[in-house]
Amino acid sequence: MAASETRPRASDGAEATPRSMRARTSSARVSQRLLFGLSAGHAVKHFYQQGLIVLLPHIKDGLGLSDVAVGGIVGARAAAMGAMNVPAGVFTDMYRRRIGLMLAASMGCLTFGYMIVGLAPYYWLILLAVTVAGAGTSMWHAPAFSTLATRYPSRRAFAFATHRSGGSLGDTSGPIIVGLLLGGISFWGLNWAGFGWRTVALLHAGPSALTALAVLYSFRAPPKDAGGKSTTFGQYLRSAKPLLGNTAVLGMVVVSALRGMAHQSFAVFLVLHMKENLSYTDLSVGLHLGLLTFLGILAGPVFGIISDRTGRRLIMTLGMAAIAAIVFNFLWADSGIWLTMMLALLGIFVFSINSIMTAAAMDAIEPGTEGSAVAMIFTGGAIIGAVAPVIAGVINSTWDFQGVVIYAGSIAALGAVLALVVPMRGSSASRRARDD
């Protein structure tokens, strides 16, 4: 009798298997919605971030700015991004169930910042506007990356790369659409002169506001596995303190910063070179700038899969070396079809490897500090990168675009060397996830 009572009934087993399968299917669907939802929001964020670069020549002409002042706009944005990353990381790790509010606030700052850009009559107001918008862009990183890190512990590089591909989609479409809005179109008898740069800036307010509402709706009940319980500030400090001495994380901070310095310095003055020296139309400038990220939409996830299987160092080192080599090619490929081809080739690497760096940092930490690790990476990059466009502005004024090419290529080459030697290690959480 006892044996018959303890023996599982066939009907129980038959019911349990479909139930577990349904649970796994439901979990997979939630996981996919989370990944692609965050990636879509990232696309919106980067649409704004990259679209601003196309506006810069018009802001320069409209306000009568120098090259150094233009570099100051990009530098102010980078500094604001760096400053906001720290509180964003702290808030993310302490209040995991409030991530939706942070993501919505990110979009709200973009809305407000671009409204100021559209209305500002003075340079200092433009600096204030890009500061607000820059803070908004950084508020997205920590909650989004930490959510993906906890949801995909054994496939972090792939998840981050997919999220980055969303950003690349925004980076690609943003310059093209902004260029079209600025320059208009003349095609098959259709002639439209486009909008002024202030109108285009004001038009940015709508999509980000709608995205903020969509985020609030989507995160009204956050996924259970997207974050843990809230912690006190004292608990947070005790868990986050080891990050300051984590050489693997600090190494990724430096390498990521060098990648950002090379990209920002090159992209800003590439746009001015195309507009002022090559007399490209706004639409042509937007199309070329879109090429800087287009191929990375597909390359990013591929690099992520390879990195998850073979390790981070090889992809990072080769990626930084490729960026340096391609940038140096602009010393001779500075116009025409060769410029177009080099931009497309550069687009394979310039953003794709950033996700691998973030994954490498996540590999080296313990659970509960993901937001702060992301904050360190983006803060270090933004602080160091805030000075780079200003220096590039001085170089461009003295040695023109070719001087900027040498400057940006040298920074990327230094990043390749450091990627080859910086320490890396896998965390216990990562090892457990791989073992499972």
Image: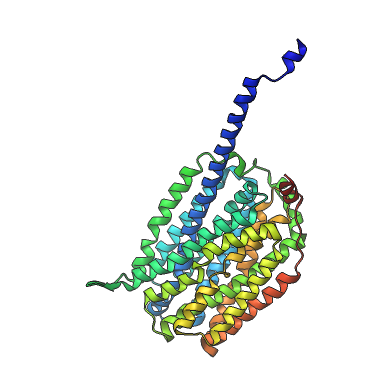
In the picture, measured across the screen, residue 20 lies left or right of residue 193, that is right
Q: What is the x, y in percent for residue 46?
A: 49, 62
Q: How many marks?
A: 0
Asked where in the image residue 374 lies, by quadrant, the reply is bottom right
Q: What is the x, y in percent for residue 289?
A: 46, 73
Whether residue 139 is visible to the viewer of this picture, yes or no, is no
Quadrant position of the N terminus in the picture: top right
Camera-nearest residue between 414 and 235: 414
- Above or below 313: residue 72: below
Q: What is the x, y in percent for residue 26?
A: 55, 37
Whether residue 147 is visible to the viewer of this picture, yes or no, is yes
Q: What is the x, y in percent for residue 323?
A: 60, 75
**Residue lying furthest front:** 10
Camera-nearest residue between 372 and 355: 355
**Residue lying furthest left:** 189
| Residue sitting at x 62%, y 71% | 259
Which color scheme did the rendering employ for the protein?
Answer: rainbow
| Residue sitting at x 48%, y 44% | 218
| Residue sitting at x 59%, y 83% | 328
Camera-nearest residue between 170 and 377: 170
In the picture, measured across the screen, residue 200 lies left or right of residue 6, that is left
Camera-nearest residue between 147 and 386: 147
Quadrant position of the C terminus in the picture: top right
- Above or below 205: residue 126: below
**Residue lying furthest top:** 1
